[in-house]
Image (tube, coloured by chain):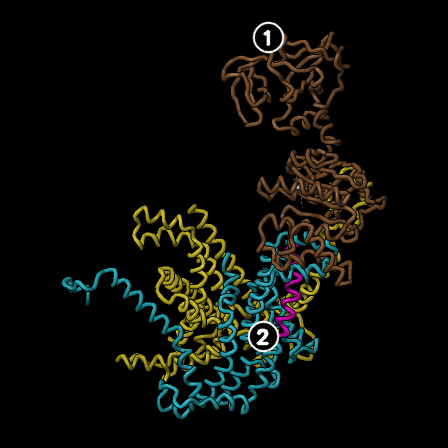
Amino acid sequence: MAVVALDTICKRYPGGSEKAVDSVSFTVADGEFMVLLGPSGCGKSTTLRMIAGLESISSGTIAIDGDRMNGVPAKNRDIAMVFQSYALYPHMTVRDNLGFGLKRRQTDRAEVKRRVEEVAASIGLTDYLGRKPHALSGGQRQRVALGRAIVRDPKVFLFDEPLSNLDAALRVSTRAELVRLHRALTATMIYVTHDQVEAMTMGDRVCIMSEGRIAQIGRPMDVYMHPASTFVARFLGNPPMNLMEGAATETGLRVNDAAVPVATILNSGSAVTVGVRPEDLVPTDKADNALFSGQVTGIEPLGAETLVHVDARDGSPPIIVRGPREVAARLDETIHLACDPAMIRLFDAQTGIAISSKELA
Amino acid sequence: MATARPSSVFISPASLKMGALVVFIALYTAYSSGPFVWVAMMSLRTTTEIAADPYALPWPLHWEKFASAWTDSNYDAYFVNSVTVVLAAVAILTVIGGMAAHCFARYRFRFRGVLYFVIFSTIIFPPQVTVIGLFQILVEYGLYNSRVGLVLVYVSIQLPITIYILEAFFARIPNDLFDAARIDGYSEWSIFWRIALPVALPAISTTIILNTILLWNEFLYAVVLITEDDKRTLPLGVLRFMGDQLEDVGMIATGLMIAIVPVVLIYVFFSERLIQGMTAGAVK
Amino acid sequence: MSRDVNAPATAHAEAAQEAERDHANPFSAIAIFLLPALIVYAAFTALPVARTFYNSTHLIVPNRPAEWVGFTHYVELWSDQMFWKAVWNTLTWAAVAPVLEVSIATLLALALYAKVPFSRFLRVAWFTPVLMSYVVVGILWMWIYNFDWGALNALLRAVGLGDWARPWLGHPDTALPALIAVTTWMWTGFNMVVILAAMSSLPSEVLEAAELDNCGWLAKLWFVILPLIRPTLLNLVVLSFIGKMKIFDLVWVTTQGNPLWATETVSTYVYKRAFQWRTFDLGYPSTIAVIWFVIVLAGVLGLTFLFRQRDRLEY
Ligand SMILES: Nc1ncnc2c1ncn2[C@@H]1O[C@H](COP(=O)(O)OP(=O)(O)O)[C@@H](O)[C@H]1O
Ligand SMILES: [Mg+2]
């Protein structure tokens, strides 16, 4: 059992003018894989380090299994952490690196040895137990860092961008391995990353942060489908969600030339930001009711799919469409785009916050 | 001269330059090493032999002079004093200098910059400004004419440079390493002993060697703070020995060699590390 | 540890929280790590310095309480011929030696940089003198300068310059230069090693670029190498200056300031006044020490400032 609860956590570094972390609250359920996602500098690491007990908490409380942790030093929190730089002890062998934390808690030498060897076997490090970190490859070092956390059998695992120093292929395989590990251990894990693919593929839930605050929390697919703000809409998804200007009408919504049958609570005439995922836009012949019309300014075949850039040449931001492997569009031709009204997301034009909407029958 | 004879086709300007270089290097090497060769030769010859010809090769080799220098004077006592004082001072320096350097490199705290600057600026203090006050204070503490007092003074004079060298090294150890050890359950104190010190071993050994040499040679504080013969360190002893044996050049040379040999031995085994330590303060 | 003083209105509510430990910078650990060094520093460096400053305005005679004499010592010092002689000698030393050491060292470093054979050996050999105690060095060079059988005079006689032979340390005109030659002997190798390290770490592209510009060897040295290692050279000059301002051991072992105060330095003078002359007053020598401290400080700051200034003008 390990439930990690953060209640309006704030962090202000000495000398820092802004709060690095501002009123962050969330609860990670027992055995849950929670991902903290956000651009660099948004306070993810700081949040994680406060959970770990490496940074003091300016205000708010952190509780693990209901016990207040604010004043408890890291060593008494029964957590393990994997660092981006791996932070392996350079003067110790792999065996000693793995056993270092255990020896502190477990005095039975034989038990430490047994446990270290068991974990080393499970992550394929048995042959490297006698080596020092400098004699290992990047992937092997990453495994040692991982093994050092596993061997301790902690209540909570914390990861701070553990894959960002690996090459692309290794990152994909390690990602899968981490998911497998999470299932096997059924442990509570909190995972920091700026990589949305990691967040989407690994997390039970994702917590997206921006400038020290939580932008949205939810299951990855929910967040993807229903971004709570234009920030999330643009941050999640590659390419990001297309945002267009629109206005509410008596009968629904007007976007460019199209009358879209979507009901809102907005007064007729008020401005709104309209979001559509690139994969939800399809070319249409009906020019008079197109959501968006413009010239094709770029075609990027990616193999499995093709990205088409469309620009209205009226100052509004260009639109990206995700099409199949073969697209009919040709460069410089004018095309018209439409979309299923159910896939349209609306945001307040001023604040960028999502507005609930409903498709009209 | 070669340049005066253009017909000489054998000496090109390039080889002339090379020749000048070789002569310059040879002269400087003679200037630099000659004195050592000379004293080494004299240390193995008797004064009578030296008086006959100061520059003859040492033959036969009078190794027994080293034994008699050791037994006929207080050399054994001086040597033991130097060894104990230097070893004790270096051990204390390494521990408390390492602790302070670790603290400066690792933690952020109020007055950190001020404290570091105050300690570091002591490097330029002329010793006169401390030596008189030190003399009075040690007399009052009852540490005058005591090896303990000398050890503490040695610790204090080498502390700034030790902290300076170690801090620079500790600061390069990534912080994640310490955080990992904290999460692994270790206290700040054991992190210092089990992580910081072992990882910084190259810098630690540099300061150990540097401090050993500098303190082994230290003279000013020793001459002010030690007057009793049985507490003298080797530099004082050598000087005393010279005072006693003014005419006995051969024996003084032997005494000098006894003072030189330990340094040379350290140098032979650790020359790179030693050069690194000696020059650490000079390279920015 | 350090708190945000400009905490907003929530400061009140946060105060209780902030009292909790700063995990990244635990105060108790900082105190434990720092305390031993600070105690040693306070007891054996700060306190003696303060004591010396205190002494400088007092008459300090054994078995009597210190007597406040105001600035009489400072006034006395102003007309103390021997002090000014010592200052002159020390300043001469501190001005000449750094130039000699650094310039010869640069030449030696260039020789090794040009990859002459045995350069590893030469580097080690030239460095050796700096490892010796001034006591050993002093005795050794007293012999070398000996009139009857010293190596220098023997050499002069051997090459037919017997007229030049003289008791180098026994004559007021030659004693100080002779001692400066000794410190140069000791420190040049040290400077050479530092300069060589600086040269070796020069970016090779710069030198190759100079090569392409068809730079001559001397031009390359003057316009490329020296300007690039300038900071190192200046650093060494300052370091050597500081060292010479402190010089005591060598003089004490060889001449003790003789002949005729020709080699008296401030350090030896302080030592004589404090511990040798049996005047039993520690106040006056303390005054010398304080004044000297100020002069050294001014010298170091002045040099640093001078070098900074020129650097700024150039770039
Ligand atoms: N030790 C520190 N001292 C002062 N400011 C810091 C410190 N660590 C991080 N910050 C600041 O806090 C903010 C959040 O940093 P961090 O949590 O590391 O971001 P992330 O991990 O999301 O990239 C940044 O603006 C950063 O500059
Ligand atoms: Mg981070």
Q: Is residue A353 left or right of residue B278?
A: right
Q: Is residue C202 left or right of residue B244?
A: left
Q: Give the chain coloured brown.
A: A
Q: Is residue B99 magenta?
A: yes
Instruction: Indicate which label's residue lies in the foreground, 2 or 1.
Output: 1
Q: Is the C terminus of chain A in the top left, top right, bottom left or bottom right quadrant?
A: top right
Residue drawn at 42 percent across, 52 percent down: C228
Local packing at callout 2 (Cα closer than 10 Å; few below 14, some 14-19, many 20+) is: some
Chain hosting mark 1: A
Chain hosting mark 2: B
Residue type at mark 1 is Ala
Numbered label attached to residue C183: none
3D distance between C-alphas at marks 2 and 1 = 96 Å
Badges 2 and 1, same chain:
no
Q: Position of residue C252 (x, y in %)?
A: 50, 78
Magenta segment, prevailing SS (helix, strand or loop): helix
* Position above or below: C275 against A5: below
Residue drawn at 49 percent across, 58 percent down: B283
Q: Colour of chain B?
A: cyan
* Ligand 2 falls in quadrant: top right
Q: Colour of chain C?
A: yellow
Residue under label 1, please give it.
A287
Q: Position of residue A246 (x, y in %)?
A: 67, 14
Q: Position of residue B256 (x, y in %)?
A: 48, 82
Residue under label 2, please give it.
B221
Q: Is residue A275 magenta?
A: no
